Structures are given as C-alpha cells and as structure tokens.
Image (tube, rainbow, N blue to C red):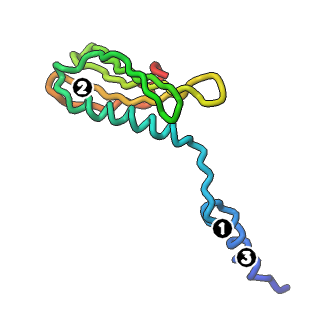
C-alpha cells in the first residue's frame, strides 16, 4: 500500500494560511482606546513608585477623556499591618456602545525603607 506523503505538507501549508497573521490580517480584539487608557494608568503607577514613602498619600481622582470616552483615574494609598502601604491606581473607562466600564489597575507595596514589592493578581481582585 502506497502512502501519499504530499498530503501532510499540504495540510501544514493550509494551516499556516488559515492563520490571520500569515495572510497579513490582524484582528484587534483589544480596543486601542482601552490600551491607551491602561498606558495612562501604568504611567501614573510608575511615577508613584519613584515618590518617597512619606509622600505617598491618597490623591483626588482625575477625570480623563480618551477618544471621546470618559474615564476616571484614582490613587488609593492603604496602610498595611507591617508598616508599609499598598498603592493602587484604579481607572474606569466608560464603554462606547454598552452600559458599563472597563477597568485598568496598577499597584505595588512600598515600605518605610523605600523598598517596593509587586502586588499579586489576587491582590487586585478587591479593586475592580
């Protein structure tokens, strides 16, 4: 019995062509406005990481507009039992067509000796 070995490479070629990137197509599933908003939140978090421990305080929330979508960015500074603080930058961006809001979060722990520790994904669950 003879086996046709050209089928396997052909199937591999078809699989490659069925990939959107192979055809030069890219379907964005993440809105560019939300990406820009998340960048804004992350930049605020980066600035806060450079502040001295003594200067980390709650700040008034900030109203922003990203491509006609209104959003709010707030900074929360929460004392933790070991003497440090948990700093969370919390952003909410209104959806364009449906009710609701998208959430962007950044955060860290900072201690009196100026050391910084990252927040785990579970630490963010209380803020969305």
Residue under the point 59% across and 48% down: 28
Query: Of the numbered discs in the image, which one, if any, rests on residue 3?
Result: none
Res 110 → quadrant: top left
The kind of secondary structure element at disc 2 is strand
Res 64 → quadrant: top left
Query: Of the numbered discs in the image, which one, if any, rests on residue 16?
Result: 1
- The residue lying toward the viewer, choosing from 84 and 99, is 99
Q: Are marks 1 and 2 in contact (CB under 8 Å)?
A: no
Between marks 3 and 1, how big is the CA–CA gap? 10 Å
Residue under the point 56% across and 25% down: 101
Q: Earlier in the sequence, mark 1 or mark 2?
A: 1
The residue lying furthest to the left in this view is: 113
Q: Are marks 3 and 2 in contact (CB under 8 Å)?
A: no
Q: Residues within 10 Å of mark 2 (few under 14, many from 20)?
A: many
Between marks 1 and 2, how big is the CA–CA gap? 47 Å
Tag 3 residue: 10
Q: Earlier in the sequence, mark 3 or mark 1?
A: 3
Query: Of the numbered discs in the image, which one, if any, rests on residue 110?
Result: 2
Residue under the point 25% across and 31% down: 49
Q: Earlier in the sequence, mark 3 or mark 2?
A: 3
Would you place residue 55 above or below residue 36 in this image? Answer: above
Image location (x, y in percent) of residue 12: 68, 71
């Amino acid at each position: 019995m003879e086996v046709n070995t050209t089928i396997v490479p052909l199937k591999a070629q078809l699989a490659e062509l069925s990939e959107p990137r192979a055809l030069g197509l890219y379907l964005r599933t993440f809105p560019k406005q939300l990406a820009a908003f998340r960048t804004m939140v992350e930049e605020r978090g980066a600035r806060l990481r450079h502040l001295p421990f003594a200067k980390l305080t709650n700040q008034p929330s900030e109203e922003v507009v990203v491509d006609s979508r209104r959003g709010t960015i707030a900074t929360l500074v929460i004392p933790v039992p070991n003497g440090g603080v948990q700093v969370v930058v919390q952003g909410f961006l209104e959806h364009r067509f449906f009710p609701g809001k998208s959430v962007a979060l950044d955060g860290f722990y900072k201690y009196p000796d100026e050391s910084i520790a990252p927040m785990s994904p579970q630490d963010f669950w209380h803020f969305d």
